[in-house]
Image (tube, grey):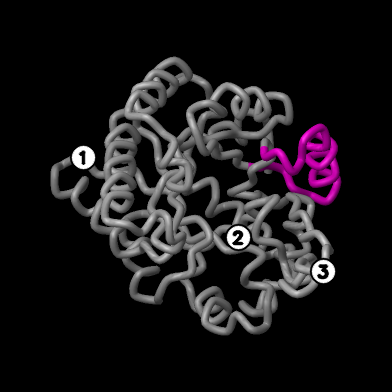
């Protein structure tokens, strides 16, 4: 059994194919997908999709959506977390975080606005007793600073997942020390990603989870290089159905069989997201 801890099944790239793609993933052995929202306008739709597909979801405001977000969206998030607080399929606050890679988000004003939304959402996660799913792109130290500030104030966040982690070993262990799991996926299937693959191989066994970030971050076999895209060839659409193949590609780097990796990362995903663990028990899932 595989768990895709990060899948944007509601993305426009899937459109009417979303439920068919989910069925294909289930047939391949993906028991659960975690569907994180990226903006307040999507909260209802993501929740409805998770219920329709038998999956789980998270609610949050993604750093890429901060430029068009309003402070009132934080109130909308608070209201949604309160309204659906008893929904067993609501497992985290996410996708939240900081992105210091996109040039438009790296101005002084936009860095400050991202921090405002990030720290406000950390406070909401703590208030509602939920872990967080954080977007990490050239921002690990700043994310860690926010988490440590919450802890220093006596309101620690209940751990979560560092999505698409690609930082240093030291940063990885700092997240782990704060109760986080590290998300790995298609990027680690590239043989040229030596540092990321070394981190995957060396990370503590109880600290790793798998994800697709579908429709984004395609694995090596779906990736279309820039020159081909420039010539008109579309980028391959990632899918939660690719998770078992991603796992099979990464398992040997840790000296594991694919089935053992599926079991290990599923245990870790349920540890990161306690409501998922409770729901799995309730539904009789292994």
Q: Nearer the viewer, residue 23 or 16?
A: 16
Q: Nearer the viewer, residue 241 or 209?
A: 241
Q: Which mark is residue 135?
A: none
Name the front one of labels 1 and 3.
Answer: 3
Q: Which mark is residue 155?
A: 1
Q: Which residues are magenta?
A: 11-33
Which residue is labeled 3 in the image? 231
The residues tagged by marks 1 and 2 sit, at their Cα atoms, a distance apart of 30 Å
Disc 1 and disc 2 in contact, CB within 8 angstroms: no
Q: Residue at x 85, y 44 (%)?
A: 24
Name the front one of labels 1 and 2.
Answer: 1
| Horizontal and vertical percent position of residue 261 | 66, 64
Q: Which image quarter is the C terminus in? A: top right
Q: Pick whichever of labels 1 and 3 is earlier in the sequence.
A: 1
| Outermost residue toward the top in this view | 83
Which residue is labeled 2 in the image? 264
């Amino acid at each position: 059994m595989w768990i895709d801890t990060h899948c944007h099944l509601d993305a426009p790239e899937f459109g009417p194919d979303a439920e068919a793609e989910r069925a294909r993933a289930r047939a391949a052995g993906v028991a659960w997908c975690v569907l994180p929202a990226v903006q307040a306008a999507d909260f209802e739709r993501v929740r409805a999709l998770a219920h329709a597909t038998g999956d789980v979801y998270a609610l949050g405001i993604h750093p890429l959506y901060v430029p068009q977000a309003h402070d009132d969206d934080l109130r909308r998030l608070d209201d949604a977390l309160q309204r659906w607080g008893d929904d067993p399929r609501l497992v985290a606050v996410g996708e939240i975080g900081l992105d210091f890679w996109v040039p438009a988000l790296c101005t002084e004003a936009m860095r400050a606005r991202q921090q405002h939304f990030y720290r406000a959402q950390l406070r909401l996660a703590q208030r509602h007793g939920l872990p967080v799913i954080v977007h990490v792109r050239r921002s690990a130290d700043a994310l860690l600073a926010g988490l440590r500030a919450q802890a220093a104030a006596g309101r620690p966040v209940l751990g979560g997942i560092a999505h698409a982690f690609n930082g240093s070993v030291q940063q990885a262990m700092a997240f782990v020390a704060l109760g986080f799991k590290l998300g790995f996926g298609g990027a680690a299937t590239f043989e040229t990603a030596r540092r990321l693959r070394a981190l995957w191989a060396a990370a503590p066994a109880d600290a790793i989870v798998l994800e697709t970030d579908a429709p984004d971050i395609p694995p090596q076999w779906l990736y279309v290089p820039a020159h081909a895209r420039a010539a008109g060839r579309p980028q391959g659409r990632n899918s939660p159905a690719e998770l078992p193949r991603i796992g099979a590609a990464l398992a040997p780097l840790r000296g594991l069989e694919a089935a053992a990796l599926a079991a290990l990362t599923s245990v870790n995903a349920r540890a990161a997201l306690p409501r998922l663990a409770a729901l799995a028990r309730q539904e009789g899932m292994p």
